[in-house]
Amino acid sequence: MVQSAKKGRVQMPATKDFALFRRTRELENEIDEFLNKISEGGLAFRLGVQIYMNHGPTAEFEEKLYHVNSLENTADTLRRSIETKLYSQTLIPESRGDVLGLLETMDSVLNLMEGALWGFSIETPDVPEEYRVDFIELTDRVVLSVDELVKAARAFFRNIEAVPDHNHKVMFYEKEADKLSTKLKRAIFGSKLPLPNKVHLRSFVESVDNIADQAEDVADRLAIYTIKRTV
């Protein structure tokens, strides 16, 4: 029935009903709200990096940092509530472990976005002007990968046939982020900046790029969960 999970490519049968939720509306709403926090975190993260690159560690940048921090706290609360409901009400027992694994790894994506912004806030790296556009473009591609991951996760609960298409886009944007990350690091280490500055800037390139890497890892897990629900 299902032949391949490589990079999210899964063939779906046409007739079977794969809707995960039928009688658990409250749980479904909480998962929707949790995914909303991840998506909103991506938007706030992108604005935060844009502000830092254009204006430095301003009050407006700090506002975006605390916005992401607040979203992360709310997402943690929602995740714990969902976990409690799944166990205490014995909901969707056949998929419980996969749903919990998905939520925990999705949460880690938001944690990485928050951590990257904290890094900018605490260490206030001096980013030369010639690298700022690439930092912003790298962030755009990272957030696009996160957006597609959120869509894939929503599809897992409602329209599982759409998961492979969204997963494929996660992989695409992750690779685009890798290309830009490599380009940026080559430019930094090919410059005349002092070595400590180069190493410092590299750590920030990687802190942003790692978010797309994590999104790809979650998409790989999601591909396996999808296969398990369709066999």
Image: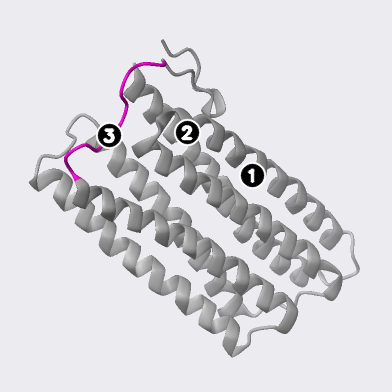
The secondary element bearing badge 3 is classed as loop
- The colour scheme of the drawn protein is one colour
Q: Give the mark nearest the N terminus, 1 or 3.
A: 3
Stretch of the chain drawn in magenta: 14-24
Q: In this figure, which residue is indicated by the disc labeled 3? A: 20
Residue 225, image x and y in percent? Answer: 37, 30
Q: Is residue 187 above or below residue 14?
A: below
Q: Residue placed farthest to the top in the image?
A: 1
Residues under numbered marks 1 and 3 in contact, where contact means CB atoms less than 8 Å apart: no
Query: Which image quarter: residue 194?
Result: bottom right
Three-letter code, disc 2: Val
Residue tagged 2: 163
- The answer to which of marks 2 and 3 sits earlier in the sequence is 3
- Decide whether residue 92 is among the magenta residues: no
Q: CA distance from mark 2 to mark 1?
A: 17 Å
Check disc 1 and give the amino acid type.
Glu
Query: What is the x, y in percent for residue 120?
Result: 61, 75
Q: CA distance from mark 1 to mark 3?
A: 28 Å
Residue with the mark numbered 1? 174
- Identify which amino acid the numbered label 3 is placed on: Leu
Secondary structure at numbered mark 1: helix
Q: Which residue shows up at 76% across the image and 46% down it? A: 179
